[in-house]
Image (tube, rainbow, N blue to C red):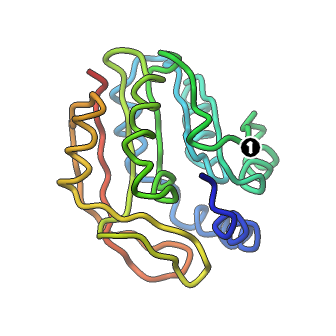
Amino acid sequence: MVDRDTMAAYAANIDKYRNLVTKIGGNSRLDGFLARLSEGAEILDLGCGVGDSAVRMRDAGFAVSCTDASPDMVATANDLHGLDAVQKSFSELQEDAAYDAVWASFSLLHAPRAEMPANLVRIHRAIRPGGLFYMGLKLGAGEARDAAGRFYAYFSEEELREMLAEAGFSVLAAEPDSMVGLLGSPEPCIHITSARD
């Protein structure tokens, strides 16, 4: 399910979001993630946003595919970085063993909590055996909208570990953290890197 209010919020704030990403320099966990992969590995950036991670992957010599549910994010990623990002929701991920890794940097948190198990199963299917999966999420409980109108699903580390195991992943690293997002206030989050069994 794609939340229309979330898409509208990103459309209204696309320049602010792009400037924020530029200011913080992107996800600091990306270099460590890429270091675990073989040269030229095929990576899916699932929820690529404005393409900041994807362009770093591409420039490091990896083969990158990019998707995002927001047409404005896709257009911005392509305009800024010359990527071939396509508009696609999580439920439209249907590939089978197509990637060596999937990178989902603070994207899956926009899907309802009830959809997380199925999303993880689709991601597992899309990754080749032994491949890697990174996801960044906000920590907490329940579901809510922020002041910009974006929908968020919150999870505990224990919940995420259980769902990942049920989907067929082995957690390699789970790092609690704090992030400052579009609205400017710090929030607890977690970075989890897993391997596909």
Image position of 62 (left or right of 30): right
Location of the C terminus (image quadrant): top left
Q: Residue at x 51, y 77 (%)?
A: 145
Q: Which residue is mark 1?
A: 81
Question: Residue 159: horizontal and vertical position, in percent?
Answer: 22, 53
- Specify the amino acid type for callout 1: His
Residue drawn at (62%, 35%) of the image? 92
Q: Is residue 42 above or below residue 187?
A: above
- Vertical comparison of 36 with 96: above or below: below
For this view, does 83 lie left or right of residue 160? right
Instruction: Name which residue lies at 51% across and 65% down.
Output: 24
Measured from the top left, where is residue 44 in percent x and y? 55, 31
Q: Nearer the viewer, residue 31 or 94?
A: 94
Q: Nearer the viewer, residue 168 or 39?
A: 168
**Residue 172 rendering spot, x and y as whole percentages:** 21, 36
Q: Is residue 71 left or right of residue 177?
A: right
Quadrant in which residue 164 is drawn:
top left
User: Which residue is rendered at x = 56% and y = 84% of the image?
Assistant: 147
Determine the secondary structure under disc 1: helix
Residue 26 screen position, x and y as percent: 51, 55
